Amino acid sequence: MCGRFNISNKITPIVSMLFDTQFSVVTNENFSPSQSASTITTSENGFQQVNANWGIKPNWSKKLIINAQSETVAAKPTFRQSFILQRCLVPCNGWYEWRTEEGKKIKYFFEHFNKLPLYMAGILFKHEITELVTLTTAPSKTCALYHKRMPVLISPENKDDWFSSSTEQLGLLMSSVNDEMINVKRSE
């Protein structure tokens, strides 16, 4: 998955109602690493919004890490603790991928087929500044035509399982989504 997604404040009422919390975002059609993302996480009082900068830079890394592979996130020392204790969802309108066609990079937008919010799985790292890493998985058949990875998408009906299940139980939730759920269109 590339490092760009789209978020619009038009999804705020839907997200607020689903999570029974006051959710707000600033529209950003080209959200990129290091920017502050609005996420949903849990607390003793239910769901809450937490803003987090997208990406971490451990002292051993030469670059910003924005994604972790769902297949190995529970085992990697960099991600393990956050995956156990600090899961989140990143509501968005969709994400972008680029594909080379006839020698030119063409931008594509991936969104819910009914234009509903998508909920990308992520993990938080709480320090002086809260940081976010999103999770990726093997792509669906359609998404594979554009990129070798795609975001882990959690459906609204599985939101409680995402936050309450043990790491061993999360395997099925982190697999690619049904192709019928995603609409792909060329983006200008």
Image (cartoon, grey):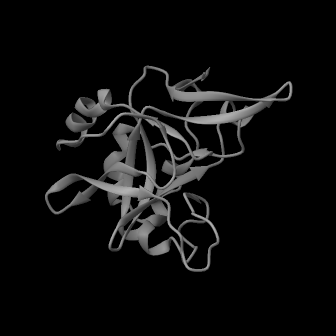
Q: Quadrant of the C terminus?
A: top right
Residue displayed at 72% across by 45% down = 148
- In the visual, does 176 lie left or right of 114? right
Count numbered badges in the picture. Answer: 0
12 or 145, nearer to the observer = 12
Q: Is residue 91 above or below residue 117?
A: below
Q: Where residue 37 appears, x then y in whole percent? A: 38, 49
As rendered, which of 138 and 12 lies closer to the eye? 12
* Left or right side of 74 for 63: right
> Picture coordinates of residue 103 (x, y %)?
85, 29
- The image shows residue 183 at horizontal and vertical percentages of 56, 23
The one of 95 and 59 positioned closer to us in this rendering = 59
Residue drawn at x 62%, y 45% is 2
Question: Residue 182, percent across and down?
Answer: 54, 27
Asked where in the image residue 185 lies, by quadrant, the reply is top right
Q: Which residue lies at the image location 21% right of the left edge and 61% below the top edge? A: 43
- Identify which residue is drawn at 44% across, 75% down: 81
Q: Give the answer, above or below, for where 154 lies relative to 74.
A: above
Compared across the picture, whether 109 is left or right of 148 comes to left
Q: In which quarter of the image is residue 142?
A: top right
- Asked if residue 52 is positioned above or below residue 32 in the image, the reply reads below
* Residue sticking out furthest to the right: 102
87 lies above or below 9: below
Based on the displayed image, in which of its 4 quarters is residue 70 positioned?
bottom right
